[in-house]
Amino acid sequence: METLAYLPAIELAKRIRSRRLSSVELTEALLARIEASQPSLNAFITVCRDGALAAAREADAAIALGKDVGPLHGVPVSVKDIINTAGIRTTWGSRTMMDNVPNADAIAVHRLKQAGAFIIGKTTTSEFAHKLMTDAPLFGTTRNPWNLRYTPGGSSGGSAVAVAAGLGPLSLATDAGASTRLPAACTGIVGLKPTLGLIPHSQVPDGFNNFIHLGLMARTVADTALMLDVLSGADSSDPHSLGVTGTQALAAISDMSSDSLRGLRVAWRPLVGNTMLDDEVRRACEEAVDTFRAFGCHVDLVETPVENAEQAWRVLQQSNWAARFFDRIEGLAPLLDPSFAEGIRAGGAYSGQQITRATYKRTEHFRTVQGWFGTYDLVLTPTMSRPPLTADHAALEPIIIGGLNAGDMRQSWVPYLNLFDLTGHPAISVPCGWTNVGLPVGLQIVGPWYGDAAVLRAAAAFERARPWMHRIPPHVSELAP
């Protein structure tokens, strides 16, 4: 069962199509692992046992009848619980939404189903995806399978844990300021934030100023590429997607040779608006950068200061929360995570001029980052400035790096991430090492707009040179029923 749980989605789909594996067998195995894991890992808010088994039976019947099937036919996937799923409650991790059942799927969920996948459950998130941890009043705390004392990061921590712990090979998440790449780094998996609009987001209330991306989580780069191929392409609901064609990312990484990256110009930026970086994280990332040098890339250490994007991000995101909740905050506050309520109140205090200036600053950040790609093909950074925090770390408390107070969590832990949400550039986190106590470390690879295939090719080359699939979280052995 453990071997089955860790097979890539591509291999699972192949076995289901060839009838060497039934979708029902796979689904029953994953459901058993989910049930066994919930008391310790707590990765799911809603488990779709009956619906998943019914879909698995239909998938097996379609194969038996010789029907044409999609590339993810019969593969169970999980979906972050802020993404709409028809007939399955979508709670946003909030007691205020605990009975919310959408009547239609988000576009991305619809496309997963068109490809033959079905939903096994909805994964945990901080309330309304507002913070870098995964705990909420509705469901409690989600924990890291590498060490239960630690957080898987947030806000898509449940999705990351589901993939890392073998509770399903793929998870659909979101990334507005770190929410896919940080949990991926904390749990030792792959997390992709594609170019803004490459996967249409049909739920955001402001399609034009949006910087909330759909995020993809998998254990392998190839699975991530397949998922991108399934989900990418224009939809009328998202203005950033108009004119965008679907990707062929899986094909782009399948024909790579050992010297496919030779000659690429690569910038290594250990600091991006921050001044502190944990020694173990730096060491793991610099070893990863040496791998790119071994590929034949021309790698430059770039230490030109970059303005931290957190201030503009905070104004834009908190004012977004306030637009939705500020007029009801006094009545809602007793039901909300205190850090979310505080963010709503802060957003309600911003003036129109402050919000507009933050929008101007977002444009400045875009032009700065876009300028990097006049010189470089790729940019490498750490995914996070220090290893995972403990699961009980309060969102509004400062973090410690190298024994020193580093201040605000979002400003000092993930400056590498919220910058590229504001600018829209594609960015992926891949595992690049482990700390002395066995916690994962992530490397971020960033590319130019619509350079998603190039980012995935670099990630695939790194995966071949420094594989991580054989690394299984130590807590997972306890999951077999």
Image: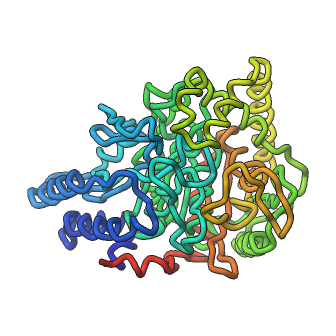
Residue shown at the point (78%, 50%) measured from the top left: 408
Asked whether 395 or 285 is in front, the reply is 395
Residue shown at the point (49%, 40%) measured from the top left: 199
Asked whether 309 or 241 is in front, the reply is 309
Q: Position of residue 317 (x, y in %)?
A: 66, 34
Q: Position of residue 259 (x, y in %)?
A: 64, 70
Q: Quadrant of the N terminus?
A: bottom left
Residue 26: tell me if it is visible.
Answer: yes
Q: Quadrant of residue 184?
A: bottom right
Q: Quadrant of residue 385?
A: bottom right
Q: Position of residue 222 (x, y in %)?
A: 47, 63
Q: Is residue 398 left or right of residue 128?
A: right
Residue shown at the point (21%, 69%) measured from the top left: 25
Count of picture labels: 0
Q: How is the image coloured?
A: rainbow
Q: Is residue 151 left or right of residue 262?
A: left
Q: Quadrant of the C terminus?
A: bottom left
Residue shown at the point (67%, 36%) measured from the top left: 343
Note whether 279 is above or below 96 in the view shown.
Answer: below
Note whether 344 is above or below 54 in the view shown.
Answer: above
Q: Is residue 433 left or right of residue 20?
A: right
Asked whether 124 or 263 is in front, the reply is 124
Residue 251: tell me if it is visible.
Answer: no
